[in-house]
Image (tube, helix red, strand yellow):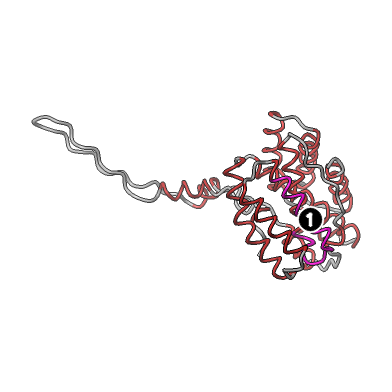
Amino acid sequence: MLPSWIRPVLFSAVLVGASACGGTPEAPAPAPGPAPEPAPAPQAAPSLDLATLQAQAQNIALTPSPAEMQAALSKAQITQSLAELVQKREVDMDTPNKDRVAVRTGVLVADVVLTIKTAPKEDLVARLQGIQKGMQQLGGGADIDNTITDLVNRIQNDAVSRDELVKDIDELAGVIIPEIEYEAGEKVVPLIQAGSWLEGANLVSSAVMASGKFDTADALLKQPEVVKYFRQYVKIEGENAPDEVVAKLEQTLGQLEMITSGETLGEEEVKTINEQTDAVLALL
């Protein structure tokens, strides 16, 4: 199962909606006096139809994960492994701007997931340590830090198989998302996810271009709702904390929203998606 730390995890709307339906409010006590008015009838619990639930939970399971992207490529009979396309990156986490750190961390998250079974040990360790540094900068807390340290130590000592590592990374998700939201606030999570999605979209578009199977682009890359979600969030945050990476990300998402909202995607659109995502990743 794919780690949930690279998917939207804002479930509060659903939880709030569910609690709203959880019972009947208690009737108020009757007013004092010789002839009290009867207490008002209990109010019926508000009903939440499907449309309401969808509106409240619009962020749930919104972004496709890198592993889902790889599976979609296989279904489209594109044999190019995304792991083979992942570049080695020198990602600098020593910046006070948390927006930039969050995007960079998200890119590394996607790279770890995509290369977890095939990457050389030193590359996998470097990516995990980059994620660890990013989480430290974001105020992720001791649990995340200790968990990643333990994972890195076991990899360096050959004390874990790659199949076991997949499971361990999945379990790491159960630590990271709750703690990063608690320690650093929910605002960093969408930017981590945006970085992961950005990397995945870049790699998928590269794979489509290499295969020449542009007729698969709609199924693989046509996700205007995803782009719109990230663009709205990045635009709001970018106004509060201007940053070169985030500003470029917002600009790129605006262009991608127009492209992916079109009737269909062809060779030109795929190349544009690849070029635009390349431009953001080059700033990292």
> Which residue is depicted at the point 83% across and 58% down?
123
Magenta stretch secondary structure, dominant? helix
Does 272 lie within the magenta span? no
Write the residue at 70% across / 65% down: 166
Neighbours of disc 1 within 10 Å: few (<14), some (14-19), many (20+): many
Residue hosting label 1: 111
Q: Amino acid at mark 1?
A: Asp
Q: Nearer the viewer, residue 215 or 248?
A: 248
Element under label 1? helix
Compare residues 269 and 86 and report the one nearer the observer.
86
Q: Quadrant of the N terminus?
A: bottom right
Q: Which residues are magenta?
A: 113-135
116 falls in the magenta region = yes
In which quadrant is the C terminus drawn?
top right
Q: Measuring from the top left, give residue 145's x and y in whole percent.
A: 66, 50
In the rendered image, which quarter is residue 39 located in? top left
The answer to whether 81 appears left or right of 45 in the picture is right
Position of 112 with respect to 10 (left or right) is right
User: Foreground residue, 84 or 97?
Assistant: 97
In the image, is 209 to the left or to the right of 170?
A: right
